Amino acid sequence: MNDWLSYSSLLTSSFLSATLLPGSSEVVLVALITAGKGNITGLVFAASVGNTLGGLTNILIGRLLPGKPQGRWHDTAITWLRRFGPAALLLSWLPVVGDLLCVLAGWLRFSWLPAMLFLAIGKTLRYILITIATLQGMEWWH
């Protein structure tokens, strides 16, 4: 697999994983790192860009939703999101909850630039931590 294919596969996997579709871009990232495919910085960049674009897609979906979500859980989430604003998107990397945070952020009409900034920071930090853990694990086994 050449580097371009490694990066594009990871970007695609991370995009799909960030949308409401199931996926696990972390597995693809770890597999590419352990196989020595691509540059570490390039892999983290591709994963982060894809995952951020997927999160932005969820925000767009939220902006297209009519009406108000119902139920105590939704009310709690909305209150929490209004309190923390776009900074809440630092947690957008969390499984299931992160997708919902992005959709609700869109529904609440968070400003695009702060939402994108916090979304990108949270998702990039996750991939950096996964990369560090993978590299340390590889050193441990050698």
Image (cartoon, rainbow, N blue to C red):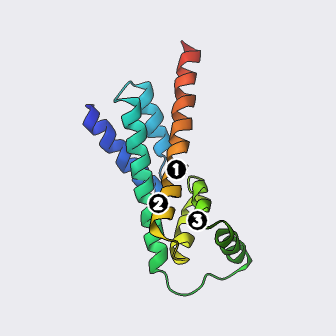
Q: Residue 116 location in percent, x, y?
A: 46, 60
- Report the amino acid beneath label 2: Met
Query: Would residue 74 be found to the left or right of residue 99 on screen?
Result: right
Report if the CB atoms under discs 2 and 1 are less than 8 Å apart: no
Q: Which residue is mark 2?
A: 116
Residue visible at 37% across and 43% down in the picture? 46
Residue depth check, mark 3 versus mark 1: number of the one nearer the observer? 1
- Report the amino acid beneath label 3: Leu
Q: Secondary structure at mark 3?
A: helix
Report if the CB atoms under discs 3 and 2 are less than 8 Å apart: no
First in sequence, mark 3 or 1: give its number. Answer: 3
User: Dot 2: few (<14), some (14–19), or many (≥20) neighbours within 10 Å?
Assistant: many
Residue visible at 57% across and 64% down in the picture? 86
Q: Residue 91 location in percent, x, y?
A: 61, 55
Q: Which residue is mark 3?
A: 101
- Distance, label 2 to label 1, CA atoms, is 9 Å
- Distance, label 3 to label 2, CA atoms, is 13 Å
Q: Residue 73 location in percent, x, y?
A: 71, 73
- Report the amino acid beneath label 1: Ile
**Relative vertical location of residue 136 with respect to residue 73 in this rendering, above or below:** above
First in sequence, mark 2 or 1: give its number. Answer: 2
First in sequence, mark 3 or 2: give its number. Answer: 3
